[in-house]
Image (cartoon, coloured by chain):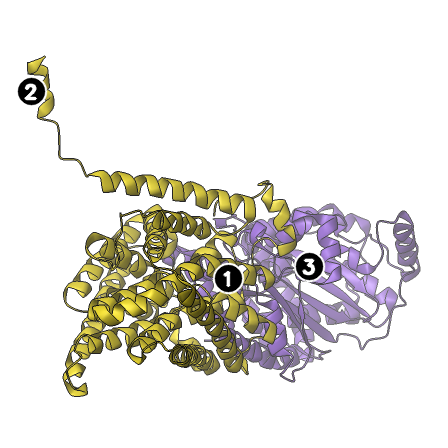
Chain colours: A purple, B yellow
Amino acid sequence: MSLEAFHHSEPLTLGVELELQLVNTHDYDLAPYAEDMLRLMHKTPLPGSVVPEMTNSMIEISTDVCHSCSEVLSQLTPIRDALVKSADKLNIAVVGGGTHPFQQWHERRIYDKPRFHELSALYGYLTKQFTIFGQHVHIGCPDADAALLMLHRMSRYIPHCIALSASSPYVQGQDTQFDSARLNSVFAFPLSGRAPCVLHWSEFETYFDKMTHTGVVKSMKDFYWDIRPKPEYGTIEIRVFDTPLTIERAAALAGYVQSLGAWFLHEQPFTPEEDDYLVYTYNRFQACRFGLDAVYVDPPTGTHMQLRDHILQTMDKIAPYAEAQGATGALQLLRADVEAGQNDARWLRDRQREEQMLAEVSRQASLKFRGA
Amino acid sequence: MNELMGFWGQWLRPSAGLPTVQWALLLAVASTCGYLVYRHTGLPKVVGYSIVGMVAGLLGFSGAQWPLQGIGLFIMELAISIVLFDAGGRIPWRWFRHNPMVLVQSIAESALTYFAVYWTMLWLNVPKEAAGPIALVAMAASPAVVSRVVADTRAAGPVTDRAMVLATLSTLYALTFGGAHAEMLSRPGSSFFEAVPPVLVMFGVSIVVGALLSGLIRVALRYMSPASENTSILALALIAASTAIAAHLGGSAPLAALIGGMLIKQLHVRPWALPRQFGTASSVLTMLMFVLVSTVAAQADWNLAIAGTVFTLIVVRLVAKALGVGIGNIGSGSSWRQSVWVGAAMMPMSSIALLIASQFMAASTATGEVISSIALPTILLMEVFGAVIATVALYRAGETHKPWAELPAAKSGDDQRES
């Protein structure tokens, strides 16, 4: 199968997907209610879509094509409200966060859909361990070459995205000491990590053809890269975000990505190169492990600095573009948290320190998601 | 030698007696049978317990007598109270505000069951005084059996949750109306107004004891973790005390526990973690309850007429429950397919039905005999086959840990673990 042609999209347009947890209101463990939620949600006219995910305690919502992060929020809000209403009707709750803090992976059941069963047959227990929850942000690119350029430029800011969205400190009832433990589950998949550093679509087509020739890959869906091109949408898709605890933060993160993209397009600030990736895995690990307190190694200079300082510096650089995109508020929301050393992982740990009961942390997270 | 015997004599104590030995051995056999049934068929352990109790009852085991009384009655009430306290704690009132159709579904299935069974009994020439109580006994689905089936199959999902809630609510109605009816039956000559005060006393005591129970546990949860073993022991001790007090003061112990569980769910919004810690103590009591129920129920006299009546009752009850769940299903957020399995999962009858029948027996021996002659065989059959039907329903609904198709593999015992 050859690679699909890169479709046209309006530059810097946004699309956001959120994978969400469905939990019961009894002990706040994951609850297999995806089918029921889908049935109820399809009765309500909404923007975007609601679709099943790998296991039947997960659900994925997505926006239509948006032009700004405020439009993202204006679409996510009615979807969230409808989700909450449907959940109330079923006596369950919807929760954000990159992992469910105490669910046991072996208790999960694969959602009844051919592709999920195929993946389960191939990956075995990894598919059940893939009961993790991420936010994907699509950003429109002018053309295919510009998309690859955008992708590799964005790679330098992957640690930023991880630290700002980190919300998965707990796995199987334990504090992992990571702010984002979710990405460790993604790493278990072959073809995860980074995309090959090619800057022209023709080269990427050659790479894709070689991969399909090996029989390892059939479509772009088989790549679990942190950022991947999405030719059918004319976008690149950033996939390292943990699902935040609120839709407001999800929209703000989309605004951050859009502002970065605008900066790249208008200033062409640097040309990505293979050597950028020398520190990629290290920076990624640091962000997952320490969140905003991570060390960031600047790829071109090798300078070490606090990730939170680099995030603030970047925010200063992209502030004018944020203003042009209507994302100033989004940046302010994120900036305030960075200055306070706060992210969702910190919030979850604070709650657990206070409550000493992860189920209660999940309950409070469900209230946070519904905007209570 | 004499000196030695004299010394030994100081240590001899009166034995607990042969009944204790008989019961201990019966429980040992039931435990083994439950395990083997579970391991080799995938059916819940409660089926094994009930079969052992049934065989013991049919063989004339005299360890438990009908009507229940004394320590046997207390153990039964205590086990039911623990189950109902947990079941009540799974009922959030806010759900009915967001989805009133669940309440409609519950009322529809209970009301339909009552009237369908009542009229069927009249049609089969059962006396009117006995037809009402039998209909009330039939109304109660068994949260005890459903919760054991759920635990053994490790089921979770919409059908499981709704079956548990509807079974608990049907129990609430049956205990409430059954208690009131039994009080009135025990005063045959009195007018309606003369019968009202004792009924109110029964409810009042149950509500006060339930409120006290939930209040005390709520206070404990302010300072103690719900995940702690000590909190669980405290809760178990308080449930035992409230069971004894409610029964002593003329209230209904199971009703008090159910009200206690429902109240604490409203007073304490945090996640419910107590029952997980109840552990082996409550498991032993529950097992004892199932064995006791089938042992007692097996003591009923069988004849062709009774068999026909019992069979008709079971069929009418099955149809009425399924129809009621179906009628209330409209707009309740559940699919038609799911409502069929919810109806099927509500088939079991067990300890609560036996306790209600026992109340009628205590209220009027003559009418109680008629009620028992039909209720006991029905309870016996529905404890065993109800559990099987509920298990099949949860498998078919796709909510068990292992899918239906993998059951034969489970028969080999490869991956069949204790829950």
Residue B292 sits above or below residue A59 on the image: above
Q: Nearer the viewer, mark 3 or mark 1?
A: 1
Frontmost residue, B81 versus A163 = B81
Q: Position of residue B79 (x, y in %)?
A: 30, 56
Residue farthest to the front?
B304
Distance between the Cα atoms at labels 2 and 3?
Answer: 89 Å
Q: Is residue A196 left or right of residue B37?
A: right
- The disc at residue B390 is 1
* Label 2 crowd bin: few (<14), some (14–19), many (20+), radius 10 Å: few
Frontmost residue, B37 versus A121 = B37
The disc labelled 3 sits on which kind of residue? Tyr
Q: Is residue A87 left or right of residue A311?
A: left
Residue farthest to the top?
B1
Residue A81 sits above or below residue A31 on the image: below
Task: Please determine if labels 2 and 3 lie on a single subunit.
Answer: no
Residue A29 sits above or below residue B406 on the image: below
Evaluate whether residue B136 shows in this view: yes
Q: In the picture, residue A248 is in which quadrant?
A: bottom right
- The disc at residue A157 is 3
Q: Is residue B109 left or right of residue A73?
A: left
The disc labelled 2 sits on which kind of residue? Gly
- The disc at residue B6 is 2
Distance between the Cα atoms at labels 2 and 1?
Answer: 59 Å
2 or 1: tag closer to the N-terminus: 2
Q: Position of residue B331 (x, y in %)?
A: 54, 83
Distance between the Cα atoms at labels 3 and 1?
Answer: 54 Å
Residue drawn at the location 87% of the way across and 67% of the way down: A144
Secondary element type, mark 2:
helix
Callout 2: residue from which chain? B
The disc labelled 1 sits on which kind of residue? Ala
Secondary element type, mark 1:
helix
